[in-house]
């Protein structure tokens, strides 16, 4: 048996590789859902991607195990972007369709056996595995290794993650009369990305996602939701004033989403790390701070 800890994109991709190679594989996920940052939220008639907004690649064949019809667009520089119809959660669902994913399995300790590993999870029977892949955000994987008294490259402790606060915005009245691309990257120092979910063909009705910059998110991450919304509205007003000072923002922040481990600020010099025989770390800390980076790490790891 092969066990993957974490059902984000890296975990789902390595699990598919194992399955396709003929191995028995189980994915253990601490949350009530899978996909990690492949996350889509529906609010009434609106639909928002509130984690990963796109994959950046030249061709969809660079994105393994994709089984839906990708939506493509290019920016002014010619860079190619791909999004999943009806939201990035669909990509996660496609990746998980043939897998044994066990939700609400928080792995708390890994024991080394003569023939492999035993994984202890809260309120569940232990799982035994010949090989284990840890695909959660690196700080969580390292905490698990520390709790298990398993040594790893100390340089990995130097890899820190950015936080991200996300605002999901809907409109009761008309949308502000401005032309908005599907994705705007780094439009102001406070805003890392603005996504028009209707232009991206995720929502049938006007819906915008604001991904706040890491420095801004760090400041407000532990504030109350009311304080977060107030500060975010001020940042949105400043952004609109740059585009057109006569435009009035009439939207409403419907929800705030939080990512404690949005993306790594630096990355390892290798695509995966085998910390002990057949105990392997993978994810964006190795392949690069993006969904494509997570995939790159997962397809490089040994089976």
Image (cartoon, rainbow, N blue to C red):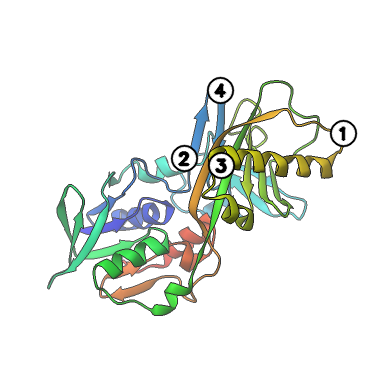
Q: Report helix, strand or loop for mark 2.
A: helix
83 lies above or below 58:
above
- Of circles 1 and 4, the one toward us is 1
Which quadrant of the structure image shows residue 33? top left
Q: Mark 3 — residue?
A: 70
Which residue occupies 71% across, 20% down? 173
Q: Mark 4 — residue?
A: 45
Q: Report helix, strand or loop for mark 3.
A: loop
Measure the C-alpha gap from mark 4 to mark 3: 22 Å
Across and down, in percent, residue 20 comes to: 32, 54
Across and down, in percent, residue 28 comes to: 28, 51
Measure the C-alpha gap from mark 1 to mark 4: 29 Å
Q: Report helix, strand or loop for mark 4.
A: loop
Residue pushed farthest top?
173
Q: Mark 1 — residue?
A: 246
Depth order, front residue of 128/244: 244
Q: Report helix, strand or loop for mark 1.
A: loop
Instruction: Say which label, 2 or 4, has the lower sequence index.
Output: 4
Across and down, in percent, residue 22 comes to: 25, 56
Instruction: Say which label, 3 or 2, has the lower sequence index.
Output: 3
Instruction: Say which label, 1 or 3, has the lower sequence index.
Output: 3
Q: Are marks 3 and 2 in contact (CB under 8 Å)?
A: no
Q: Are marks 1 and 4 in contact (CB under 8 Å)?
A: no
Measure the C-alpha gap from mark 3 to mark 2: 13 Å
Q: Mark 2 — residue?
A: 89
């Amino acid at each position: 048996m092969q066990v993957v800890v974490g059902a984000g994109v890296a975990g789902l991709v390595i699990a598919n590789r194992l399955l396709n190679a003929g191995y028995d594989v189980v994915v253990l996920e601490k949350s009530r859902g899978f996909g990690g940052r492949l996350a889509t939220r529906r609010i009434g008639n609106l639909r928002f991607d509130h984690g990963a907004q796109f994959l950046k690649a030249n061709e969809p064949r660079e994105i393994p195990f994709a089984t839906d019809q990708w939506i493509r667009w290019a920016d002014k520089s010619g860079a190619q972007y791909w999004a999943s119809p009806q939201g990035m959660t669909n990509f996660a669902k496609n990746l998980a369709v043939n897998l044994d994913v066990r939700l609400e399995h928080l792995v708390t300790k890994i024991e080394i056996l003569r023939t492999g590993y035993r994984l202890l999870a809260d309120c569940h029977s232990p799982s035994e595995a010949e090989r284990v892949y840890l695909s959660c955000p690196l700080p969580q994987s390292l905490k698990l290794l520390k709790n298990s008294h398993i040594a790893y490259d100390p340089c990995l402790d130097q890899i820190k993650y950015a936080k991200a606060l996300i605002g999901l915005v809907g409109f009761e009245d008309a949308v502000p009369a401005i032309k908005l691309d599907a994705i705007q990257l780094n439009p102001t120092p406070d805003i890392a990305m603005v996504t028009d979910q209707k232009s991206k063909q995720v929502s049938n009705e006007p819906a915008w996602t604001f991904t706040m910059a890491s420095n801004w998110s760090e400041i407000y991450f532990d504030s109350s939701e009311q304080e977060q919304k107030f500060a975010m509205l001020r940042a949105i007003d400043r952004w609109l004033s740059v585009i057109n000072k006569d435009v009035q923002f009439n939207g409403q922040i419907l929800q705030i989403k939080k990512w404690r481990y949005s993306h790594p600020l630096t990355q390892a010099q290798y695509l995966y790390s085998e910390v002990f025989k057949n105990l392997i770390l993978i994810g964006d800390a190795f392949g690069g701070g993006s969904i494509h980076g997570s995939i790159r790490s997962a397809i490089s790891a040994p089976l």
